Image (cartoon, rainbow, N blue to C red):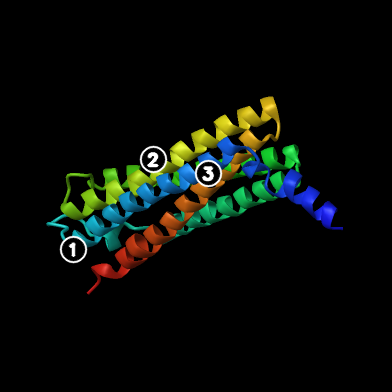
Amino acid sequence: MDHGYQQHTNTNAHLEYQSGQGRLNILGFWVFLGAEVALFSTLFATYFVLMHRTANGPVSSELFQVPSVLIMTFLLLTSSFTCGLAIHEMRRSNLKGVIIWLVVTLLLGAGFLGFEIKEFIEYTHEGVTLSTSAYWSAFFVLTGTHGLHVTLGLGWIILIMIQLKQRGLTPTTTSKVFISSLYWHFLDVVWIFIFTGVYLIGMVMHHG
């Protein structure tokens, strides 16, 4: 019984931790994530400081569209769930399952980006750009930085999927899948803060 459990933990559950390089990469990633937290904290702080400095430009409550923002949130939250399912399949040593759920994650992430780009284009048509006011500068820098990170995350997952196809589930490829999933969940958490702090507050901020 004990031996069976030992075998299970060594071969399936923690494959990404089996190689020394894999463990180092995961540790290094947590350090990198700390820097990312600092970056987004700075952007959020700047946004909240400039929140009411709209000059004579349009205010957020006039432009924010509830359905679009809810769809974007749904897509990203669901993609975080499907990314978790990919890790679940990885732990079961099911390469096909990992690939399928990563593809679904990519499609949802791409859908999120599509809506964000559409939103930015619509704002531009309304005459709102980076230079409209301090508020809109902070808004575009914060949401745009997150969008750029999502784009990089999608590219990263695609590269990892190519490696999975070539090499299968090894201690090296699984550590990369695991790290990319942590990154994806992190972007999801950042979006929840953006959804709450920027969009929900922004929709009511200038009323009255």
Residue in view at x 34 percent, y 44 percent: 145
2 or 3: mark nearer the eye? 3
Image spot of residue 7 (x, y percent): 80, 48
Q: Amino acid at mark 2?
A: Leu
Amino acid, disc 1? His
Secondary structure category for the residue under label 1: loop
In the rendered image, which residue does mark 3 sit on? 26
User: Sequence-wise, which precedes: disc 1 or disc 2?
Assistant: 1
Q: Is residue 167 left or right of residue 147?
A: right
Q: Is residue 107 visible?
A: no
Task: Answer whether residue 162 is visible to the viewer in this image.
Answer: yes
Q: Nearer the viewer, residue 118 or 99?
A: 99
The answer for how far apart the CA atoms under marks 1 and 2 are is: 25 Å
Q: Position of residue 53 (x, y in %)?
A: 15, 59
Kindly check if marks 1 and 3 are in contact, taking CB atoms under 8 A apart as contact. Answer: no
Circle 3 crowding by C-alpha within 10 Å: few under 14, some 14–19, many from 20: some
- Mark 2 nearby-residue class (10 Å; few <14, some 14–19, many ≥20): few
Which residue lies most toward the right here?
A: 1
Q: Are marks 2 and 3 in contact (CB under 8 Å)?
A: no
Real-space Cα separation, disc 2 to disc 3, in angstroms: 22 Å
The residue that disc 2 covers is 148
| Amino acid at pointer 3 | Ile
Q: Residue at x 32, y 52 (%)?
A: 38
Foreground tag (1 vs 3): 3
Query: Badge 1 is on which residue?
Result: 52
Q: Nearer the viewer, residue 1 or 126?
A: 1
Answer few, some or many: residues within 10 Å of disc 1's Cα (few below 14, many 20 plus, some between 14 and 19).
some
Q: Residue at x 31, y 56 (%)?
A: 41
User: Where is 117 relative to 190, above or below?
Assistant: above
Q: Secondary structure at mark 3?
A: helix
Which residue occupies the foreground of this view, 200 or 183?
Answer: 183
Identify which residue, 150 or 36, lies in the foreground. Answer: 36
